[in-house]
Amino acid sequence: MTEHYEDYPPQQSYNWHTPDGLLMALKRSADHNNPRDVTLLVKGMLITGTLCSQSEFVNDFAYLMNMDEGQRADLVQSMHDVEDNIAEYLHLKDVALVAPMTLRLTNQRFPYWRCRLNTVDAWTLGRTELGS
């Protein structure tokens, strides 16, 4: 028996660049001061941390960079100038890289992490702890 592709129903096109709707909802919740611990799989790296608001991220980033109020305002403005949609980014704090274990870093913990929502391949609620 010969199969013909036209015998099958057409496949729905799925845009892999479309962010996960549930993750977007968690991001919006974090933007309203409702942080959540999450673990993300991003291009083979397992990243764990707490979702935080963009405002908290920018304020703490400015503090870490020793920026004054004017520099902080310039930073916020420049972020809005270059980004089409600020909701496209996740902001995490108290971050740890859990995998790949072949990655050798002197420090696997970071104060903050920022990534595009559409780069997240998979995610789960809760933190994953580093092994000893």
Image (spheres, rainbow, N blue to C red):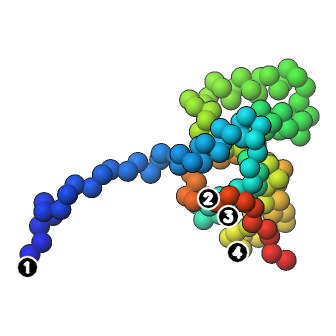
At x 84%, y 63%, the residue is 107
**Could you say which disc has been placed on residue 46 in the image?**
3
Within-10-Å neighbours for mark 4: few <14, some 14–19, many 20+: few
**Could you say which disc has been placed on residue 102 in the image?**
4
| Label 4–label 2 contact, CB within 8 A | no
Residue 121, how many percent across, how many down? 55, 58
**Could you say which disc has been placed on residue 1 in the image?**
1
Instruction: Give the number of the mark in front: 4 or 3.
Output: 3
Apparent side of residue 98 relative to residue 107 in the rendered image (left or right): left
**Residue 47's image quarter?**
bottom right
Instruction: Kindly identify the amino acid type of the residue bearing the numbered disc 2.
Output: Trp
> Which residue is the extreme one toward the left?
1
At x 68%, y 58%, the residue is 125
Per the model, the C-alpha gap separating discs 1 and 2 is 43 Å
- Along the polypeptide, which appears first: circle 4 or circle 2? 4
Instruction: Give the number of the mark in front: 4 or 2.
Output: 2
- Along the polypeptide, which appears first: circle 2 or circle 3? 3
At x 38%, y 50%, the residue is 14
Q: Mark 3: which secondary structure?
A: strand
Instruction: Kindly identify the amino acid type of the residue bearing the numbered disc 4.
Output: Thr
Residue 90, how many percent across, how many down? 66, 44
Question: Disc 2 designates what residue?
Answer: 123
